[in-house]
Image: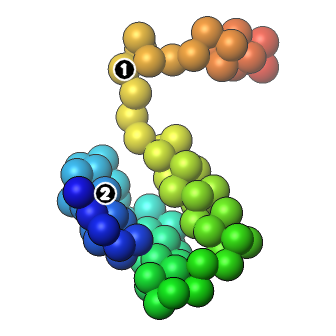
Amino acid sequence: MADTFAASIEAFVESADWLSDVHLPAVTALRAMAAQLDSGELAPALLGQFGLMYRALLKEAPREDSEVDALEAALGAAGD
């Protein structure tokens, strides 16, 4: 288990084989925020932004059909 923000991001990047060059700006931003958070500056706004960026990147991961939320599927169908 990673004990720093930077180590957790590196572990995430290593395990996320779906990441590509298109994700580099988000990964780079996460790495920069992780370095700042690891320096001891646990500013609530920075921590919140880190969480938002991480969750946004996670949403880019490919999902199995069984993982699609019913509400999300209904909203997607309504938009077509």
Q: Position of residue 18 (x, y in %)?
A: 30, 47
Q: CA distance from mark 1 to mark 2?
A: 19 Å
Tell me: 65 left or right of 47.
left
Q: Position of residue 80 (x, y in %)?
A: 74, 17
Label 2 is placed on what type of residue? Phe
Q: Residues within 10 Å of mark 1 (few under 14, many from 20)?
A: few
Residue 41, relative to residue 16: is it above or below? below
Residue 8, relative to residue 19: is it above or below? below
The residue labelled by disc 1 is 64
Tell me: 9 left or right of 37.
left
The residue sitting at 22% across, 51% down in the picture is 15
Q: Position of residue 59 (x, y in %)?
A: 52, 41
Label 1 is placed on what type of residue? Glu
The residue sitting at 70% across, 71% down in the picture is 44
Q: Are marks 1 and 2 in contact (CB under 8 Å)?
A: no
Confirm whether residue 13 shows in the render.
no
Q: Position of residue 63 (x, y in %)?
A: 40, 27
Tell me: 25 left or right of 18.
right
Tell me: 60 left or right of 8.
right
Q: Nearer the viewer, residue 34 or 3?
A: 3
Residue 71, relative to residue 58: is it above or below? above
Q: Quadrant of residue 1?
A: bottom left
Confirm whether residue 16 shows in the render.
yes
Badge 2 marks a residue whose secondary structure is: helix
Q: Which mark is residue 37?
A: none
The residue labelled by disc 2 is 12
Badge 1 marks a residue whose secondary structure is: loop
The residue sitting at 27% across, 63% down in the picture is 2
